[in-house]
């Protein structure tokens, strides 16, 4: 449990994901990363049911933090786009 100043206006019971940075501790709303419904919809559309659905759901849910960490690392390593490259990439 962590004490957070009232002036931060974070509701009691809010799930947070702390990350240590050079400038201190960065805290994100962990509910933002709640993909449960998306995972379940995907698995049901693939035909999973019953205990097999539960097993696959658990497996996919456990893989999310590692996937997000890899995404962050890939983003840090990526070369920034020039204005022209961004315009071509995003069709603007």
Image (cartoon, rainbow, N blue to C red):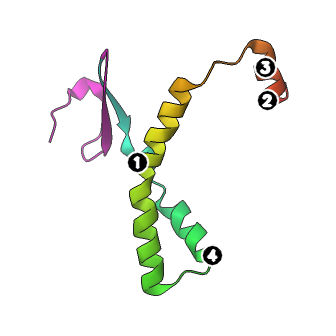
85 lies left or right of 64: right
Instruction: Pick whichever of labels 4 and 3 is earlier in the sequence.
Output: 4
Give the magenta-colored segment's residue range. Answer: 1-23
Give the secondary structure at mark 2. Answer: helix
Q: CA distance from mark 4 to mark 2?
A: 31 Å
Q: Residues within 10 Å of mark 1 (few under 14, many from 20)?
A: few
> Is-magenta flag for residue 41?
no
Q: CA distance from mark 2 to mark 3?
A: 9 Å
- Residue at image position (14%, 42%) is 1
- Residue at image position (59%, 25%) is 78
Instruction: Pick whichever of labels 2 and 1 is earlier in the sequence.
Output: 1
Which of 55 and 24 lies nearest the eye of the viewer?
55
Residue 47 x %, y %: 61, 81
In this rendering, is residue 90 above or below 45? above
Residue 43's tag is none
Asked if disc 1 and disc 3 are in contact, CB closer than 8 Å, the reply is no
Disc 3: which residue = 85
Q: Residues within 10 Å of mark 2 (few under 14, many from 20)?
A: few
Which of 63 and 13 lies nearest the eye of the viewer?
63
**Among the 4 quarters of the image, the one containing residue 92:** top right
Give the secondary structure at mark 1. Answer: helix
**Among the 4 quarters of the image, the one containing residue 16:** top left
- Residue at image position (58%, 69%) is 41
Residue 90's tag is 2
- Residue at image position (40%, 68%) is 58
Residue 27 x %, y %: 33, 31
Asked if disc 2 and disc 3 are in contact, CB closer than 8 Å, the reply is no
Q: Residues within 10 Å of mark 4 (few under 14, many from 20)?
A: few
Instruction: Pick whichever of labels 2 and 3 is earlier in the sequence.
Output: 3
Residue 55 x %, y %: 41, 75
């Amino acid at each position: 449990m962590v004490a957070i100043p009232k002036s931060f206006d974070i509701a009691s019971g809010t799930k947070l994901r702390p990350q240590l940075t050079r400038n201190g501790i960065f805290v994100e709303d962990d509910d933002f990363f709640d993909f449960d419904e998306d995972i379940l919809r995907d698995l049901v559309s693939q035909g999973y049911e019953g205990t097999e659905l539960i097993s696959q759901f658990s497996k996919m849910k456990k893989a999310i933090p590692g996937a997000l960490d890899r995404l962050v690392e890939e983003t840090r390593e990526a070369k920034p786009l020039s204005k022209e490259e961004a315009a071509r990439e995003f069709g603007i």
